[in-house]
Image (cartoon, rainbow, N blue to C red):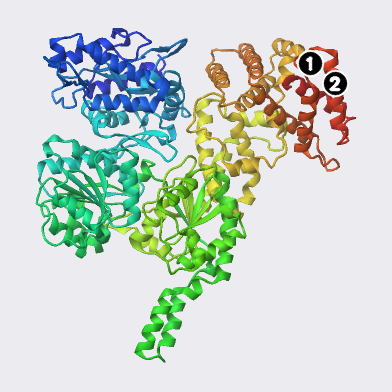
Amino acid sequence: MNHSEPNTIEPYVIEQIKKAGWTYVPASGLSRKTDEVIDEKLLKEALIRLNPDIAREPQNADEVIFKIRAAVLSQRNDGLISANETLMKLIREEPSFQFGEDGDHVSIKIIDFDDPDKTKNSYIVTNQYTVTNGTIEKRPDIVMLINGIPVVVGEIKTAFRNAVTWFDGAYDITEDYQQTIPDLFVPNVICFSTEGKAYRYGAVGTPPDKWAPWRESGQEVLEVGLRNLDAPILQMLNTEAVLDIMHFFTLFATDGRGQKTKIICRAQQFYAANKMVDRVKRSTAKQGLIWHFQGSGKSLLMAFVALKLRQDEALQNPTVIVVVDRKDLDTQITGTFKATDIPNMEQIKDKAHLQQLLEAGTRKILVTTIQKFADFDGIVDRRDNIIMLVDEAHRTQEGDLAIKMRTALPNAFLFGLTGTPINRRDRNTFTTFGAPDDEGGYLDKYSIEDSLRDKTTVPLHFQPRLVEMRIDRAIIDEEFAKMADSLDEESMEELSKRAGKMPTIVSSSERIYKIAEDIAKHYTENVEPNGFKAMIVCYDRHCCAEYKRAMDTLFPADATDVVMTTSKGDPAEYQQWDRKKEDESKLLDRFRDPDDPLKILIVTAKLLTGFDAPIMQAMYLDKPMKGHTLLQAICRINRPYPNKHFGLIIDYIGVFDEVAKALEFDEKQVEKVATILDELRDEFPIALEKCMEYFKNVDRSLTGFEALIAAQDCLPNNEIRDKFAVDYNYLAQLWETLSPDPLLSRYKDDYKWLSQIYESIQPSGGVGRLIWHALGAKTIEIVNQNVHIDAIRDDLETLILDEEVIKDLLDNPDETKIKELEIKICTRLRKYKNNPKFKQLGERLEELKQKYEEGFFNSLEFLKGLLEIAKDTVVAERDIEPEDNRKQAKAALTELFESAKSEKTPIAIEMLVTEIDNVVNIVRFDKWQWTNAGTREVKKALRTALRKQGLHKDNELFDKAYNYIREYY
């Protein structure tokens, strides 16, 4: 028997879920109707079981079910995420109903979140859970229900084709199920997907590229084999974890535009938060150190742990104090808490405000900077249910301020959180926050290696730049020493101060302008084409102003802006950058917006910590920095973003040695976060040769379909095609990273050829979205340097509407002609890849090709199937909205005239096509194609347009243009 998803992977996943505490019931064994997402019989039984006031009057359950049903239906007006938030709140907060004996209000449990013996709730896993919405019917693979409420949805994909991955299942959930059967996801807590190799999960509304793996800290997982699903399923989908995530680790955030998003924890946040809560409840130690690498979600970790601590009844309404050492971190963390609507949170205004709240024994979440403890003297609050979360614990927590803070709250729990590694020189940080029994001094650790493995962060590439402009500090020191010999001590001290600041060299207008020119060129060629943004880090505020002046000569004024602190005594020029908090926030939101013209921020100190803008890929460094400060700064660019494979640091001042030092910590471990681009240059020819090996017997001198078919014959089945896709993917990433490095010029033709082959065999259906990615911006540019690619020319319409050609193909099924037709159909379908109709046609084509390769069809049957799909493709195109038709018409005509252009006929393509578009639209009328007057007027208008370019005598060109117009207008 053949292995497949339904008979292999799906049963295995269900077996692991059963081990995690769930009972399997086939979908047919449930009592719900397919147009109801909740099993109301199971829900009513649970309500009776959990609530004595309903057990006494079972009909009261109907009122609760009605309220839950209304929350599900609310998504039709409020949207899915808002409805999900409404229902989560209803379930978690135990709503009040007048079910008491005297009509008193009583709290009703819908789910019991404290169910250690698993007898209070029912936990059911089922499969092939059919849900109908009008005429739409969908059948998710795995659904997990607590008390009849579907809280987990999983999609299983085949493990037997490399191109099909967990990403395809995630795509089905987010782009299909959540759109077509949204009611199912109103109660949803977790969505997951697997192809039997990797496990990924996400919240409702989370795009597939942001789905995450689930691993305990330090757990190594090789994504090979079914057994690698055991750990994430048993760890994340066990009944206790699902309840915990639902209760304490689910947040809803509102962004600056008022858009609602749902957030569920990452694994590192879940485990670290629970370790902190457990330590407080057990009181085994009064402290703990947590290291989660920069970009791993530390602000949200503090939100989750604060939420759980505040709601734990055993802690008797504790006070949670979040302590930061900078105003920007205060703003960032407060913003996170406010955006996620964490209750009972208060931002401390000043020192008096903090003292007043602590003396009053306030039971809230307080966010403060450590500087507000400066005036404290003696003990302020002796309570032992005060928990302090100290951010960036190693920076300012060893001085007088820290002593005053600890003296004021002697019995508080102290948890230090840091995003940068603790160096051996910071050993007192371990003494202050680390508990003796914690392995390695950390209560929880999420390292650089962990974050890169889980793709929580992207790697950083480091590139020294413009060596002749960099400051040679060794020479400066040498010259300074020579000068110092002739100076007295007072003069030498004054000279030291001036030389140490290096303002004359660094802020030279000539130097800054030359670097600005280089930045503009590098950004325009390397960063902007991929849709990313950048930051320039300057030596001081004067340099910020100089860089802004220089950049304004190279870019439009609104493409760059300065973010820095200003004061009253500053030059008048600086006052334009003196912004209120709200105005600065709006500016940064503009920077995060991919459609906003603001591309580059110019800074010196602001935004180097706590600033989160995933769209930022490049940092141009022109400021000497060291240690934690440097590492925090460069980690501004390590946030994941669609199609962002790395962050790029361009060094103009020579800090790479300092990067290496900043990464040395814990003598047993020196981890690498920055990659020298020279290493990638060495890898490119090796990766190229690996791809070319697939085609070693192909005659590259061939052109047209013969050349393409010869290359495709070297990739005869899905297994080999998928391997080529993986190898090409790596090659393409190297190209996108290095381009426009001069090294690539010698490989340009081979890379362009491989890119065309890759594009021609890319699946036209909805499979393989992770492996078969779209070509990058720089790759598209190089491919497009070919004016016309005969190999994938799109003339499907002519071929399939010609009855004689179809008859000839059916009577004489030639393999080359069949392959030619397949290529043309694939090309046509990819033009409309985001249209659901064409997605279904693509899936039909992929299924047809798969069966042909497996021997289920002969050549003639395969050809008939191709022709049927081709016919349906044209029919689908005719159903597209007129405006879409118009756009396709212009694209088709552009291609047509490009093919006709020669050196002697310099055609203004865009102008000509626009003119035809305008002329034809003036003379055409509905169903003009079926009248003599209509065809006559349109032909006349077309001749007039062509005559202006001297092309009216080319009859073949005229006929083809007219055929396009007849079809599209």
Q: Is residue 331 visible?
A: yes
> Picture quarter containing residue 959?
top right
> Which amino acid does the dot numbered 1 rest on?
Trp
* Left or right of 147, for residue 594: right
Q: Return the residue nearer the eye: 378 or 841.
A: 378
Q: Return the residue nearer the eye: 331 or 841.
A: 331
Q: Is residue 219 visible?
A: no
Q: Secondary structure at mark 2?
A: helix
Answer few, some or many: residues within 10 Å of disc 1's Cα (few below 14, many 20 plus, some between 14 and 19).
some
Q: Position of residue 119 (x, y in %)?
A: 15, 19
Q: Residue at x 32, y 11 (%)?
A: 27
Residue 928 numbered tag: 1
Above or below residue 350? Residue 183 is above
Above or below residue 843? Residue 424 is below
> Which amino acid does the dot numbered 2 rest on?
Glu
C-alpha separation, residue under disc 2 versus residue under disc 1: 9 Å
Answer few, some or many: residues within 10 Å of disc 2's Cα (few below 14, many 20 plus, some between 14 and 19).
some
> Picture quarter containing residue 423?
bottom left
Q: Position of residue 380 (x, y in %)?
A: 12, 55
Q: Position of residue 296 (x, y in %)?
A: 34, 45
> Picture quarter containing residue 946?
top right
For marks 2 and 1 on the same chain, the one whose residue lies earlier in the sequence:
1
Above or below residue 449? Residue 798 is above
Q: Are circles 2 and 1 on residues that touch, CB within 8 Å?
A: yes
Q: Residue at x 56, y 46 (%)?
A: 735
Q: Return the residue nearer the eye: 603 or 968.
A: 603
Residue 937 numbered tag: 2
* Left or right of 218, for residue 952: right
Q: Secondary structure at mark 1?
A: helix
Q: How many marks?
A: 2
Which quarter of the rendered picture does the N terminus lie within?
top left
